[in-house]
Each structure stands twice: as C-alpha cells, then as structure tokens.
C-alpha cells in the first residue's frame, strides 16, 4: 500500500484535531506529565477509528464515495480492519506505558465508544451523541484520573461541538433541511457565548490566569478563529443546505476544533500550551486542502 493511500484511509491530517483534546484536559486537570504520550495514544486511536469507518462503510462508499481506498480497490477490507485493530492496540499500550492501569479507565471506554460508533451506532439516532461522547472522553483522557472533575466543562464544550459537527456530517452526501446546520450553528453560538465573558476578562488582564499577556491574547485569537471558521461555514450551510455546503461545514467543524481546544487550554491556565495548539491550525488548514478530513 502506498503512503498516500494510507494517509487517505486514516485521514492522517485530521489527527491534528486530536492533541488539543488532551491539552485542554491536561490544563484543566493540572496533569501534564504524560500529556505527550497521551496525545500520541489519542492520535493512533483516531486513525484506528478512520480505518474502521471505511471498513464498516465499504458497501455504502461503493455507491456514494467510490474513490475512497476500499471501494477503489487500493486497500482490502481485511487490511483496513487489521490496521484498526493494530492501531487500537498501540493506543492502549501507549496509555498503559504513560499512566498505568488508572489511565486505562478512560482509554478503554474511549476505544469501546470508537468501535461501537463505527460498527453500528453511527447510522442510528444515537450516532452524533456517541461521537460527542468519544471526544469528551478524549478530553478526560488528558486530564488524568485525578483531574476528571475539573476537566468536565472542557469535555462538555468539546463534546457539544462534536455533536454539532457530527449532526451535519450525517447528511453531507445527500443534503438536508435547514434544521440540520441550524442545530450546529446554535451549538457553536452557545459555546462562543459561554466563553466570551472569560475571554474579555482575560484580555483585560483580570483574573489569576491573565497575569501573563499571552493568556488573554491567545484566548481572544483562538475564540475569534473558532467562530470565524466554524460559524461562518455553518451559516453558509444554513442558507444553502446542499451537499457541497454541508461538506464544507463538516470540514470546517473538524478544523475549528483546534482553536476551540486552544481556547479551553488557555482557560485552564496553560497559555504557552494553548499557543502551541493554536499553531497547528494553519498547518491543518493547509493539509486539509490536500486530504479531506471527512
């Protein structure tokens, strides 16, 4: 299998939207010692989910997306399934090495949610909620066993955003009524409204986490990029809910995950880490133009 085909199968660039989950959770839970290993674990699990997605959807893709690796004959179903199993095992091993059994209390349910989503729940009414649960668990994955409670708000924000994006993504091939992008735009607006007061305080230098200028600047920039990226695409889809607009809104929602994660990391009191997460945004935007994240 060519490297290009593997990259396409697992939507490799889309994994840039994953480290920020762990970063937001680690900042909220004040647990950063194993953050790098947990980020790698999350990335491998994300790639496992993408390979599993194409394995499970191979018959549907043959009709709707024949250019994908499996229906086009570039990857066999067995190989895609094997990669999903291997990547899940690698993700679990990395978590065990970094945090031991306690860390696996989140990773194992997270992996189970990813597999359950792709093998059955995706096409049910519970699909968007299941995907939202997976991303919320990924935030708690970064918080560590002792930081779960503090990381719940960040996990809820990432989960809500994911719910909106997944709701749109379900209809990106066929088109939908305005209700679908309307739900996603409402979620995005709610998240921005919830974070805006904190952003204003941080930009004004109020509060303990705003003592360093970087915190307020990063928070303000991240929230503006999030609203501009995700909200604008969803508004266009609301006006014209055709497949092209819905696909753009889905891709923008995945890309917009990065500035949202940066904003939440800044809220958690880790401005330098937040700036690093935000720096992934232009890289991801460039790569998304080459390999579709959906």
Image (cartoon, grey):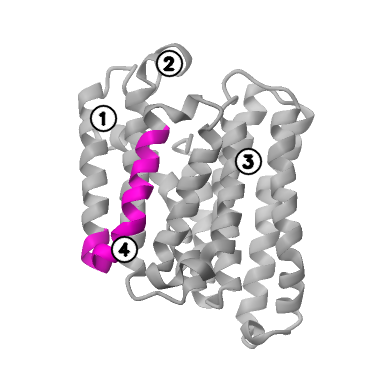
Marking on residue 103: 4
Q: Which residue is mark 2?
A: 60
Instruction: Find numbered disc 2 in the image and state the secondary structure of the residue it sits on.
Output: helix
Q: Earlier in the sequence, mark 3 or mark 2?
A: 2
Residue 186 drawn at (x, y percent): 74, 44
Residue 289 at least partly seen: no
The CA span between labels 4 and 2 is 36 Å
Q: Earlier in the sequence, mark 3 or mark 4?
A: 4
Toward which corner of the image does residue 209 lie, by quadrant?
A: bottom right
Q: Nearer the viewer, mark 4 or mark 2?
A: 4
Q: Earlier in the sequence, mark 2 or mark 1?
A: 2
Residue 257 drawn at (x, y percent): 56, 52
Mark 2 packing: few (<14 Cα in 10 Å), some, or many (20+)?
Answer: few
Which of these two is toward me, 171 or 3? 171
Residue placed furthest toward the top: 63
Q: Is residue 42 above or below residue 4?
A: below
Q: Which residue is mark 3?
A: 164
The CA span between labels 3 and 4 is 28 Å
Mark 3 packing: few (<14 Cα in 10 Å), some, or many (20+)?
Answer: many
Residue 73 at least partly seen: yes
Q: Which residue is mark 1?
A: 80
Residue 95 drawn at (x, y percent): 27, 60
CB of mark 4 within 8 Å of CB of mark 2?
no
Q: Is residue 171 left or right of residue 30?
A: right
The CA span between labels 3 and 2 is 23 Å
Task: Please report the bounds of the magenta region as a residue range.
Answer: 95-117
Instruction: Find numbered disc 3 in the image and state the secondary structure of the residue it sits on.
Output: helix
Residue 97 belongs to the span the image colors magenta: yes
């Amino acid at each position: 299998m060519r490297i290009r085909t593997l990259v396409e199968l697992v939507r490799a660039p889309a994994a840039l939207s994953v480290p920020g989950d762990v970063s937001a959770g680690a900042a909220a839970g004040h647990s950063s010692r194993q953050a790098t290993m947990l980020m790698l674990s999350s990335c491998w699990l994300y790639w496992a989910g993408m390979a599993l997605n194409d394995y499970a959807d191979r018959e549907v893709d043959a009709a709707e997306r024949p250019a994908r690796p499996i229906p086009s004959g570039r990857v066999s179903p067995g190989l895609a399934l094997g990669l999903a199993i291997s990547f899940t095992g690698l993700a679990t091993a990395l978590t065990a090495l970094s945090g031991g059994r306690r860390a696996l209390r989140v990773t194992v349910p997270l992996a189970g949610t990813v597999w359950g989503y792709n093998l059955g729940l995706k096409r049910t009414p519970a699909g968007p909620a299941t995907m939202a649960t997976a991303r919320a668990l990924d935030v708690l994955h970064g918080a560590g066993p002792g930081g779960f409670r503090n990381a719940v708000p960040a996990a809820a924000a990432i989960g809500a955003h994911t719910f909106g994006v997944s709701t749109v993504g379900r209809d990106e091939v066929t088109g939908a009524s305005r209700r679908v992008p309307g739900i996603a735009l409402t979620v995005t607006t709610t998240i921005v409204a919830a974070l805006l007061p904190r952003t204003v305080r941080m930009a004004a230098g109020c509060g303990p986490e705003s003592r360093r200028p970087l915190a307020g600047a990063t928070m303000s920039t991240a929230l503006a990029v999030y609203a501009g990226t995700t909200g604008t695409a969803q508004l266009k889809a609301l006006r014209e809910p055709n497949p092209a607009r819905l696909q753009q809104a889905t891709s923008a929602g995945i890309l917009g995950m990065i500035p949202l994660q940066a904003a939440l990391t800044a809220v958690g009191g880790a401005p330098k880490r937040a700036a690093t997460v935000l720096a992934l945004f232009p890289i991801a935007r460039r790569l998304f133009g080459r390999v579709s994240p959906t």
